[in-house]
Every structure is written in structure tokens, then in C-alpha cells.
Amino acid sequence: MEILEKAQEMQKKGIDVVHLEVGEPDFELPECVANAVHKAVDDGHTHYTHSLGMPQLRAAICNYYKQQYHVLVEPEQVLVTSGSSPAILLVLMVLLNAGDEILMSDPGYACYDSFVQSAGGVSKKFNIYESDGYQINVSAVQQMINQRTRGVFVNSPMNPTGVLQSPEVLKQLAELPVPVISDEIYHGLTYGCTARSMLEFTDNAFILNGFSKLFAMTGLRLGYVIAPKKYMRALQILHQNLFISACSLSQYAGIAALTQASNDVENRRKIYDARRIYLIERLRGMGFSIEIPPQGAFYVYVNAQHMASDSYKLAFDILEKAHVGVTPGVDFGSNGEGYLRFSYANSIENIEKGMNRLQQYIISKGL
Ligand SMILES: Cc1ncc(COP(=O)(O)O)c(C=O)c1O
């Protein structure tokens, strides 16, 4: 966020900045989704909905999981929230008493730890490494489990690495004696492979998902959690008290997204893929080693230790000198230090401009 804010300050001064730091699709809403919002306004659907979410949307989510993963989810297992972020918080509030522990990877999505702390818990991190293709070492995770452990996060495809965990790793995670909190927000954004849902491996899982990434609906704030039935009443009571319901208009948009937007999604996925291939090629051409090309989300995560050991300073220097925004690896955990994350949620023209500038920067520094 600090890189983004600094970049915005520079833009106000008239400096042209290329944004490769943002984790937000650059696409507009799919047309069918925008139409559904307008229609919902015209039809006066502007009131609170059921606290679990509209029945039609929950049914559409169940159908979607059936079609995509051949798993049976019942509507009473689905809670619709304002983005997946509140769903993460609610799950942790239900699972954690003060001092209880949640396991998560380093690097990993930075906000998980903030949610755990807000719910009174403690995050315990396990490292994942480039040399292992960023696959989780499940026996190491198993050894961290104790009486206070309440769950383990998995995010596949993953922010920041763009990597998918192998089915074997997912299967091993499913066999752990604690629930898996599976963040499936980047599902559908995969290139040459398919993401597997944790529900294909176990029912002892909380599935977090939403419409922000695949359907480019970040501002509509719509997400959901699929949970084992025994937790649903507690989740619903918390949701009623803290949030009442998700936005009614966005829920109509969500139904349209799940039932009508598949062509838009597929066209955009192909565009992301072309950008991914281009970005990887350019970064490799500048001396970054990318041994296993990321196959999901819209990120390329690279080792930049040959440029600087402090990724935060490096990202600021690249922004100030080359006018390109990138995210420092240390944002994703101390094990991410020395790395940079490039987002390809930007046009190929902008990616090209950003890469040209980065190349000049590297040449001018003699790196
Ligand atoms: C891994 C991951 N999970 C969850 C979220 C939250 O997304 P939202 O609250 O928009 O659904 C993000 C957003 O960047 C993310 O990268």
C-alpha cells in the first residue's frame, strides 16, 4: 500500500508510473454483471437480504462447486459476505479462543496474520521455498501442530507466488488433524492446469472464495465461505451481528457472474495468460531466474537478491528511479525478503513499458 500511495503522489506531480504492484484486475465488470446490478436497482432490490445470503445465490454457488469440482455442497453450508475478507475474519473468530494458533506459509498473503490477530489468535509460520517449487512440506507442518492449533491456511493458486499446490500436497493437508482453511479466491485464473478444491479431498475444510479476482468485481465486495454444517450457526450469528448481510445489488451481480459470465472469464483468462508469458520472458531476459513459471493468479514472484538484499528499499528505488511500482517480497513475510512480486493485472502495453524501464534501471545500476 505504501508503494501504491507513493506512486499516486508521484502521479499527482505529473509523473507517469506503471503499476505492477496492484493485486486487482484491470478489467471492467463483465457486461452481464453490470446489467444485473442496473436491473436490481430498477427492480428495487435495495434492502437487507437473508443474513446467510440470497437463496438463489447460495444455490448458484453450490451448482458452481458441483460443476467445477464435482463436490456436493448444500446451500445451508454457504455464508455470503462482503468480499472474502470478512469471511476470513468470521471463520477465525469461530475457530479461535485467545492464544490459539493458526498455521500459514511464509511467504503468504499478508492479511491472514492481521485477521488472526484481530480474532485474538497467534500465527505460526512455516517457510516455503523456491527450490521446492513453493510446495508446502506437510510433514514439517504436521510437526507444528499442538493442542492449541485450530487450522492451517492454504492458498492455491497463491498470492504472491502464483503457484498451485500439487494434488498430493492438498491430499496430505486434508489428512491433518485440524481443519484446512482453503483460500480459493484465485481459482479459475489458471494457465495450462486446473486448480483443485480442498473439498475434493476433505469435508473438514473452510472454503473461502469470492468474486473479486475471477469476475473483476473487487469494488462490489462479494465473497463467501463454505463451511462444515456444525459451524454454520455460529458463523451466521456473528455475521448477523457484525455485518447484517452482504450488499443486495452485489448478490444479484454474483448470480449473473456465476451463471452468465463464463465467456468473458475465458476471454480474460487468455489475455492474462499472454501477459504472464510475456512478463516471464522479459524478466528472464533481465537475468531473473524463474525456474518454475507460475501457473495461476496474476503474479510473478522473483528472487532479486542479486540486485539488493532489502526488497522494501529496492521497490522504492525502482519506483523513484524507473517509475515502476512493484511489491517488495518482505510484505509477504520475512522469508520473502530479497524477492519482488510483479502483477500482470495490467495491459500488455503497460507491462512492456514497465519492463523497458526496469531494463534501463538495471543497466544504469550496472546490475
Ligand atoms: C489471497 C487473497 N485472499 C483474499 C483476498 C481478499 O479479497 P476480497 O476481500 O476482495 O475477496 C485477497 C486480495 O488481494 C487475496 O490476495
Image (cartoon, rainbow, N blue to C red):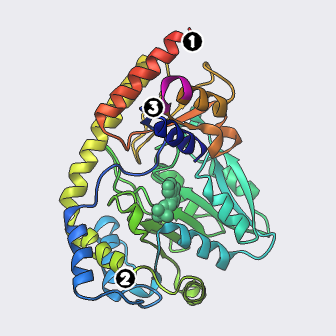
Q: Is residue 9 above or below residue 364?
A: below
Q: Are marks 2 and 3 in contact (CB under 8 Å)?
A: no
The residue beneath circle 1 is 365
Dot 3 falls on a residue whose secondary structure is: loop
Q: Earlier in the sequence, mark 3 or mark 1?
A: 3
Q: Earlier in the sequence, mark 2 or mark 1?
A: 2
Confirm whether the magenta stretch covers residue 266.
Answer: no
Q: Residues within 10 Å of mark 2 (few under 14, many from 20)?
A: many
Mark 3: which amino acid? Ile
Extreme residue in the top direction: 366
Which mark, by number, is residue 41? none
Mark 2: which amino acid? Ser
Confirm whether the magenta stretch covers residue 322.
Answer: yes
The residue segment tinted magenta is 320-324
The dominant secondary structure in magenta is helix
Mark 1: which amino acid? Lys
Q: Position of residue 52 (x, y in %)?
A: 46, 86
